[in-house]
Amino acid sequence: MAIIGLIIIGAAAGFIATRLMGIEADPVSTVAIGVLGALAGGLVIRFILMVSGWLGGFVGAMLGAMALIWLWRSYGPKGR
């Protein structure tokens, strides 16, 4: 069942990726691109999270705080 799910997710990811990148590919290549991309992306994300640890959480917190500041400046009460 996990293989079928991987193929379905790979097909969707490959379809979207090929359209965004402007590549015309046959269905088998599209699924292969999606499945291999998912495997490569998953490995990269796991490696980054393993290496970064708390630093990744800090960067995420900093980006979230920056987004809140931007929202406050854009849509909050105007300064005096």
Image (cartoon, rainbow, N blue to C red):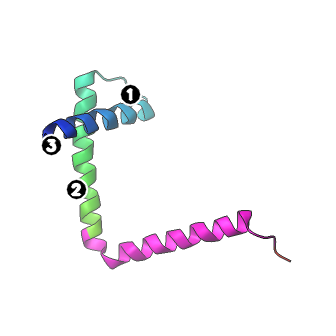
Residue type beneath disc 3: Ala
Q: Is there CB contact under 8 Å for labels 2 and 3?
A: no
Task: Tell whether position 29 is magenta.
Answer: no
Mark 1 or 2: in front is 2
**Residue 55, horizontal then vertical, whole percent:** 36, 77
Q: Which mark is residue 43?
A: 2
Which residues are the magenta region?
Answer: 50-78
28 sits left or right of 25 in the view: left
Task: Tell whether position 62 is magenta.
Answer: yes
The residue tagged 1 is 23
Which residue is at a point 35% across and 31% down the rendered structure image?
15
Q: Which mark is residue 2?
A: 3
**Residue 14, horizontal then vertical, whole percent:** 31, 34
Question: Between marks 1 and 2, how big is the CA–CA gap?
Answer: 24 Å
Which callout, 1 or 2, points at the residue further toward the start of the chain? 1
Disc 2: CA contacts within 10 A as few (<14), some (14-19) or many (>=20)? few
72 sits left or right of 77 in the view: left
Question: Between marks 2 and 3, how big is the CA–CA gap?
Answer: 18 Å
Q: Secondary structure beneath disc 3?
A: helix
Residue type beneath disc 2: Leu
Q: Nearer the viewer, residue 14 or 21?
A: 14
Q: Is there CB contact under 8 Å for labels 1 and 3?
A: no
Quadrant in the rendering for residue 66: bottom right
